[in-house]
């Protein structure tokens, strides 16, 4: 239950330290200058990332309480939460009948009747609430066991009513007599204190606030003006006179974060994002590279020396698109899309050759250490014939190794560095970074992209992804990029034959495994690992590895790979599997993205029902990477249509785009994005899945907005909005 709070009458309030709040504040005013926030609290707020009044006002209520309508005391029913306006008729109550325990009791009346009120352990209230005091109270009605079931309000929240006898007293009707916001606490600022500070801040804001939405657009979309919306989102204007049905609707919309005021902020945010992404894109295009690349003789011979196979027509086509960008004076910003196994890595490697042969360095960033390591080994092998210095930079390196790796990057000895997000760390410096490759990029956002980009003088940027996502989302995530698509798999690929078995048919899976290892091939056995049941999942994977090793395949080499292992152990196991020393690899989903061992031709997925379609497709992409026929066995229970549909889709097709479509139909776009993908821009108000339509409108309006901006005499309104957006993006992309 909420701790009862009381607003004493102002006359009895202890004198405040005199710190005059400025008569007018703006969104940039440091919180310290707000009434109710001192230096100590402003430090505490800074720890929550709140520095300015604007930051503070972005801390939205997470729900609202309807305290707008007073109830006559005669109408109260047990268990209801009610707001009443009363006069203290008499006071009494026992004190200290047990050590450290007291009850202060009073009888209050309104025109309709009376009710008892009890306060526990707040003896000082006796001094505040004397007979005749007018109060508004909010609390829950209870039946008092001690007095034969009479109705009582226990520890209600109270406010002393000031002003005229009619009880109108608006002077302090902040916490009652309206729909009140409920906030999550910030440090020691609880909802009530926050309410006060927010109200204070709002009442001193100027009527016009910096706005990313040009006024014409707000008008056209019937969105309320910014300052008004900001007030309404904190203190919704649902007055006591609003009829019941409407009131319920309005409150539900508020609680869902979808009131008209909320919608305004949602749209502003999406619009700002769309315009900002495009600004980044245009800025990048206008930049001039330190060095434009040339396709030299060195490039040609090196590529010839390293290429382990003939590229497909699609690979050649996208390489040409990439090389053209590299040879331009403006930096490349390109997305390379291609289904799992379509051979994106070798295309990136060739782009790296172009950079290196032109005297530049290349950096390849991958989302996981395993994937980074794998790329590292692949690149090392690939470039062995030409002796390029290849480096690896990841979080788990020892401090000494990391330092050494960094030094080699800085000196230029490392020509191509592969790494995780450790690459964007401040301390990583390049001698001459000319190409940035970001693999499986859906985990990285525009901001990380720009951080890595910032390590060179306008380097070319190539982003690679295998995750097919809905168009509007793609435009949001990749709106700053040109797109190339590999729409063809390397020759000889046979679709991965997929079957779905029940738990009791595991013997059949074991037979397939035996068959595979006997043929000199390798097997993945994959276990789901979800955070909620991580321990038991891990146990299951470990137990299965033991079982396979000891009971089923005592003659085979069985390895185990999971996220809890030390990085060196993981590396060791992965290398053993890649080298063929481990024949059966039992693994949790750490192998989900990118891992490439072409000799592995069978994948058994345990508890397949626990994976989403997109994830199953990614997993299955680990096999069928060579020319040998590959298989995938899904083991899972068949409870539910949804699971059945997923399994059947997997058995029916290998086409990533068809699978994405089915996933979309089954689950909506949320599933495609997964939950832990930090690359999805973090929006404060918008929910990229819920607000998909608003996102699409924002995109169209951003186009129209750019048209207007490019007009010979752009509207002042547009210029203002553009300046606001530019400033906010600069703050985001290059946080101080
Ligand atoms: P992804 O696009 O999923 O990152 P990879 O780059 O890992 O795919 O390539 C998948 C596999 O296909 C690798 O083993 C790679 O060596 C191989 N491969 C790529 N292109 C070709 C090609 N043109 N011919 C034969 N094998 C290829
Ligand atoms: Mg890949």
Image (cartoon, grey):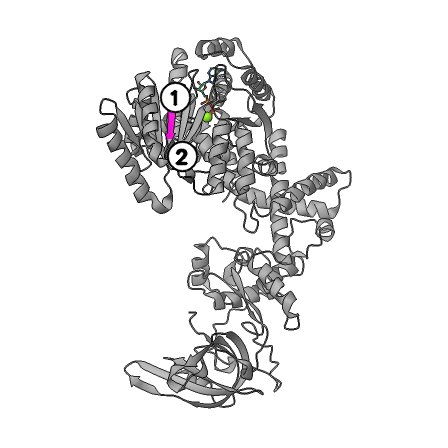
Q: At 46% from the left edge and 12% from the top edge, which residue is drawn?
A: 307
Residue linked to disc 2: 422
101 displayed left or right of 624: left
**Residue pictured at 42% horizontal, 71% vertical:** 3
Asked if 259 appears above or below 464 in the picture, the reply is below
Please tell me which residue lies in front, 55 or 177: 177
Mark 2, residues whose alpha carbon is within 10 Å: few (<14), some, or many (≥20)? some
Task: Indicate if the residue with disc 2 has its beta carbon within 8 Å of ligand 2.
Answer: no
Q: Name the magenta segment's main secondary structure.
A: strand
597 magenta-colored: no
The extreme front residue here reads: 504
Ligand 1 near label 1 (Cβ, under 8 Å)?
Answer: no
Judging by the rendered image, the residue that carries numbered circle 1 is 601
Q: Position of residue 292 (x, y in %)?
A: 57, 20
Mark 2 against mark 1, which lies toward the viewer?
1
Q: Residues in magenta?
A: 598-604
Q: Which mark is residue 299?
A: none
Q: Quadrant of residue 68?
A: bottom right
Q: Secondary structure at mark 1?
A: strand
Q: Residue at image x 41%, y 80%?
A: 119
Q: Position of residue 524 (x, y in %)?
A: 35, 27
Mark 1 or mark 2, which is nearer the start of the sequence? 2
Residue 262 appears left or right of 93: right
Q: Residue 284 appears at what percent x and percent y?
A: 60, 31
On the rendered image, what quadrant is the N terminus found in? Answer: bottom left
The reply, left or right, for residue 35 in relation to residue 283 is: left
Check disc 1: other Cα within 10 Å, few if <14, some if 14-19, many if 20+: many
Q: CA distance from mark 2 to mark 1?
A: 33 Å
Question: Which type of secondary structure does the marked residue at label 2 adopt?
Answer: helix
Q: Nearer the viewer, residue 584 or 251?
A: 584
């Amino acid at each position: 239950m909420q701790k009862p709070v009381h607003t004493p009458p102002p006359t009895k309030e202890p004198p405040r330290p005199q710190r005059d709040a400025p008569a007018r504040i703006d969104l940039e005013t440091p919180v310290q200058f707000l009434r109710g926030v001192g230096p100590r609290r402003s430090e505490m707020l800074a720890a929550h990332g709140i520095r300015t009044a604007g930051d503070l006002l972005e801390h939205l209520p997470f729900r609202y309480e309807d305290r707008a309508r007073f109830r006559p005391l005669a109408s109260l029913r047990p268990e209801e939460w009610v707001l009443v306006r009363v006069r203290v008729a008499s006071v009494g109550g026992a004190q200290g009948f047990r050590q450290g325990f007291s009850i202060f009791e009073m009888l209050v009346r309104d025109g309709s009747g009376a009710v008892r009120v009890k306060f526990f352990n707040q003896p000082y209230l006796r001094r505040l609430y004397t007979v005749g005091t007018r109060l508004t109270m909010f609390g829950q009605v209870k039946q008092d066991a001690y007095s034969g079931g009479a109705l009582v309000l226990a520890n209600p929240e109270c406010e002393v009513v000031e002003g005229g006898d009619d009880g109108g007293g608006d002077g302090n009707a902040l916490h009652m007599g309206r729909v009140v916001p409920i906030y999550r606490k910030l440090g020691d600022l609880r909802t009530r204190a926050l309410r006060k500070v927010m109200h204070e801040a709002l009442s001193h804001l100027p009527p016009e606030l910096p706005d990313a939405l040009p006024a014409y657009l707000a008008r056209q979309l019937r969105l309320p003006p910014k300052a008004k919306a900001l007030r309404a989102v904190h203190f919704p204007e649902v007055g006591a006179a609003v009829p019941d049905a409407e009131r319920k609707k309005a409150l539900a919309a508020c609680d869902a974060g979808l009131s008209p005021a909320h919608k305004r902020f949602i749209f502003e945010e999406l619009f700002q994002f769309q315009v900002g992404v495009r600004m980044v894109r245009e800025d990048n295009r206008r930049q001039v590279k330190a060095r434009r690349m040339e396709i030299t003789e060195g490039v040609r011979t090196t590529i010839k020396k390293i290429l382990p196979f003939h590229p497909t027509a699609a690979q050649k086509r996208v390489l040409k698109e990439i090389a053209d960008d590299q040879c331009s004076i403006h930096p490349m910003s390109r997305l390379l899309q291609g289904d799992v196994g379509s051979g994106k890595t070798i295309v990136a490697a060739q782009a790296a050759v172009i950079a290196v042969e032109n005297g530049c360095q290349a950096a390849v960033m991958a989302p996981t250490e395993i994937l980074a390591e794998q790329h590292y080994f692949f690149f090392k092998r690939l470039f062995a014939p030409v002796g390029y210095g290849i480096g690896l930079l990841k979080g788990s390196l020892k401090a000494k190794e990391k330092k050494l790796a960094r030094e080699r990057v800085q000196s230029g000895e490392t020509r191509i560095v592969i790494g995780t997000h450790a690459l964007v760390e401040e301390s990583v410096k390049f001698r001459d970074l000319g190409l940035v490759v970001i693999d499986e990029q859906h985990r990285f956002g525009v901001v990380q992209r720009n951080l890595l980009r910032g390590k060179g003088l306008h380097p070319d940027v190539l982003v690679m992804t295998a995750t097919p996502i809905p168009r509007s989302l793609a435009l949001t995530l990749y709106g700053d990029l040109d797109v190339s698509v590999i729409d063809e798999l390397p020759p000889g690929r046979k679709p991965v034959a997929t079957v779905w078995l029940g738990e009791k048919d595991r013997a059949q899976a074991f037979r397939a495994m035996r068959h595979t290892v006997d043929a000199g091939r390798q097997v993945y056995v994959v276990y789901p690992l979800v955070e909620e049941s991580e321990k038991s999942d891990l146990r299951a994977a470990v137990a299965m590895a033991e079982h396979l090793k000891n009971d089923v395949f005592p003659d085979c080499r069985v390895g185990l790979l999971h996220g809890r292992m030390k990085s060196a152990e993981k590396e060791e196991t992965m290398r053993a599997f890649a080298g063929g020393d481990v024949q059966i690899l039992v693994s949790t989903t750490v192998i989900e993205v990118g891992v490439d061992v072409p000799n592995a031709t069978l994948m058994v997925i345990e508890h397949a029902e626990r994976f989403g379609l997109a994830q199953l497709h990614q997993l299955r992409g680990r096999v069928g990477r060579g020319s040998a026929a590959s298989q995938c066995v899904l083991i899972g229970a068949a409870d539910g249509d949804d699971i059945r549909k997923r399994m059947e889709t997997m058995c029916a097709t290998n086409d990533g785009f068809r699978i994405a479509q089915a996933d979309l139909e089954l689950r909506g776009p949320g599933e495609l994005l997964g939950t832990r993908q930090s690359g999805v821009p973090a929006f404060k108000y918008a929910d990229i899945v819920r607000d998909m339509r608003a996102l699409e409108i924002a995109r169209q309006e951003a186009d129209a907005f750019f048209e207007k901006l490019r007009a010979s005499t752009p509207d002042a309104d547009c210029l203002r909005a553009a300046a606001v957006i530019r400033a906010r993006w600069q703050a985001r992309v290059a946080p101080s």
